[in-house]
Image: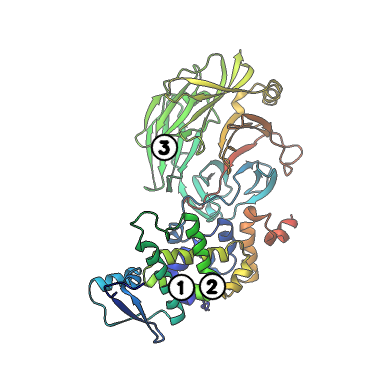
Amino acid sequence: MSESTEKKMVRLRSSDGEVFEVEESVAKVAKTLQDMLEEDCADAVIPITCVRAPILTKVIDYCKDQVMISSSSSTTNNPNERTEQERKAWGQKFMEGVDSSTLCELLVASNFLNIEGLLNLGVDKMVSMIQGKYPQEIRDMFNVVNDFTPEEEEEIRNQNAWAFERDPYYKKRSSSK
Amino acid sequence: MEPRIWSHLPQHLLELVLALLPLRTLMGLRSTCKHFNSLLSSPSFLSLLNKSRAPFLSSYLLLSHPQFPLHCFSLYEPTLGRWRKLELPFPVPATCGALNLISSSNGLLCFSASGSFVVANLLTRSCKTFNSPLYSFTSATLISANSCPSRFALCLISESSNLSSSVFVYDSGEDGWRKFEGYGSFLRHNSHQEGVFSNGRLYFSMREPFSVVGFDPRNGRWERQAAELPPDLTFVRLVSGGEERTGRLYLVGGVGRDGISRSLNVWELGEDGRNWVLLEVLPELMCKKFVSVCYHNYDHVYCFWHEGRVSKESSIGLCCYTWPEVLVYRVARRTWNWLPRCPSLPERSSCGFKWFSFVPNLNASV
């Protein structure tokens, strides 16, 4: 890790006041920070006002990894270079164990910092958490309040019935012929 | 009440996530809460949807019959061999009265009502009503293409008493009709003929002598198709190759003498558009059944392309208004079979069997 020229460091402060010191190249993975740094309008400590420390830690982990892959990508036979499949597996592992509220914060952070790769990872993770779920499971998951009257809900089920008859969720309806 | 987690997630991020959900889950979301329910009719959300999304629903064969309850249809899923009931899932505008299904294209259904037309997308439960310029028409074709899902066209052909015909084209983008010259009186003997859309043109078959003409709905030009039709035809119907066979035109026709078909064949238009290549001959027994169920009255015969949801499952449906079964030709497998009779048809139903290919599509907007 040691190099002759000292690496330029950037300091980031999370919304709850924790300060992180990272290499400039790591910070620059975030387009928002890159723009700030290049326009030289960054203060000594850059406040990341909407991201809490545990989330920022995760974001920085992601950025560090990106730097590691790309650092030697210009040379051939880069040991860190990943195939499409490996990248997918890595992404999955990175997102493993992330609960839905952390995921929401990660999405907000990667959107604010403009880190496309992380945003995509988060979106994919969220899709995998939602898909195949029944309405009540989704309500529980997102803490959504069912604001339909039972009649309204029934009507919507009826409207969907032609496309969902095989779905257990609609079983009750279709059996009534 | 604002859900706790959502409040952290800006609206556009949430929509980004939801737009990637499989259509099935997305449809299921409708009944979770009002907000999710409204998404499926929000243009900004619909524009996010991945155009190349993997299909979630089957593609259906849709049967309309005068003895079904009002605004009810039967759907058949060829891959599962299952029937299900379809009741129009949107409120029918009160002024329209009874809707009569006349055309289906790319997930949109077109109904004629008293003095107007209704074009609807059943997934988004949206519909558009517009006035008809005609009291009656001989042919109506709905045109909607995946390449341009935001607008549709409806092409009407009418015939006046003086043997001339005219064409009216409705463009949903302009919300207006344009009138063009017809092609002589070619539809006089071509009842039940819908146009067939391929490569930007609407093709019709003519008879006496048999030929194929193309109509360009953008400029109203008619053009005779160059390929000579096979000899000894008793009737012909055109079919356009859908997405699996984009740009391909098929000809389904009877071959025989004196109005009696000895065989039923399928031809495909050659790549250069100069000749019809014989693709398939309907097996003799099936042919005998088909010509006997339509009593050699080929006016009642019609065909449609049915896009399969899995590759190589696309087919051509061959039907007769007076017979409840459909004869299906799987183009890639080169197999023929009769679909079973719809169980919800009344015992004594005898005519008015109208089949359509229906492939639900969330992206097609009205």
Count of numbered circles on the image: 3
Q: In the image, is residue B44 above or below residue A30?
A: above
10 Å crowding of disc 2: few (<14), some (14-19), many (20+): some
**Image colouring:** rainbow
**In the image shown, does B224 or B207 lie closer to the viewer?**
B224
In the displayed structure, does residue A44 sit left or right of residue B152?
A: left
Q: Position of residue B222 (x, y in %)?
A: 38, 27
Mark 3 vs mark 2: tell me if same chain.
no
Q: Residue at x 69, y 20 (%)?
A: B284
Q: In the image, is residue B94 above or below residue B312?
A: below
**In the image shown, does B159 or B8 lie closer to the viewer?**
B8
Q: Position of residue B129 (x, y in %)?
A: 48, 50
Q: Residue furthest top?
A: B257
Residue B10 in view (yes/no) = no
The answer for which chain carries disc 2 is A
Query: Hey, what amino acid is under mark 3?
Result: Phe
Q: Residue at x 61, y 57 (%)?
A: A160
Q: Which residue is mark 1?
A: A106
In the displayed structure, does residue B13 sit left or right of residue A74?
A: right
Q: Position of residue A122 (x, y in %)?
A: 48, 67
Disc 3 is placed on an element classified as strand
- Residue A98 - label: 2
| Mark 2 or mark 1, earlier in chain | 2
Disc 2 is placed on an element classified as loop
Cβ atoms at labels 2 and 1 below 8 Å apart? yes
Q: Which residue is mark 3?
A: B168
